Image (spheres, rainbow, N blue to C red):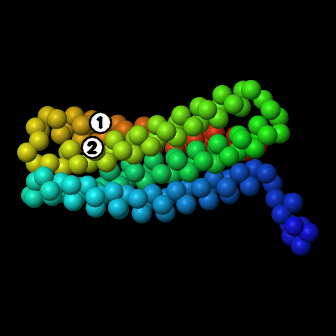
Amino acid sequence: MKDMPFIKKINPKNVSILLLIILIVIGLFVGAILSAGSINRANQRVKDIDPDAEVRPGLPFLGITLITINIFILFGLIYTHISIFKKTKSRFLIGLILFLIALFIKSLFAYISIQLLTVATALKYSNIAIVETLGFSGGGFGGILILYHVFEFFVLSIFFYVSRE
């Protein structure tokens, strides 16, 4: 650190933005890999049930990628609040850390839900009303689930930035 005096001169707000961008980029990269693998597995499952069916990867790919980005931001938030707790021993932070862990577990369940919805809505012999209700169309549950994770992404990003101040 003595060889790099410019590190001490970086504005803490810029460090927060830089860390957030790093988490988003890593989450995007890992999310794209997980999404591609997930779509391939979903296609294999669908082909086993109905050889004529095929998964449309657009929104499920976006959903899994968003969830992965949110998970990486949650990791950053949990790490930040644990390090603050070590310094302050605040009981409030214990509750906040448990809340962030609950959000993390919710994100894992959302990941599984999107995978299952992807398979269920790709099957041709499914009831059309069920596919439209559960699927990734504008009013379907899958579309709403993805929209929810878009909002969660913005909220977690703001929370990360504010937490690092």
Q: Is residue 157 above or below residue 9?
A: above
For residue 141, the mark is 1
Residue beneath the point at 64% across and 48% down: 76
Q: Position of residue 51 (x, y in %)?
A: 10, 58
Nearer the N terminus, badge 1 or badge 2? 2
Q: Amino acid at mark 2?
A: Leu
| Badge 1 element | helix
Horizontal relation, residue 140 to residue 155: left or right: left
Residue in the image at 37% along x and 38% along y: 145
Q: Secondary structure at mark 2?
A: helix
Cβ–Cβ under 8 Å for marks 1 and 2: yes
Residue 155 visible in the snapshot: no
> For the residue carrying disc 1, how many other residues have a C-alpha within 10 Å: few (<14), some (14-19), or many (20+)?
some
* In the displayed structure image, the side of residue 127 where residue 105 appears, left or right: right
Identity, as a three-letter code, of the amino acid under mark 1? Phe
3D distance between C-alphas at marks 1 and 2: 9 Å
Q: Residue at x 74, y 26 (%)?
A: 91
Q: Position of residue 109 (x, y in %)?
A: 41, 40
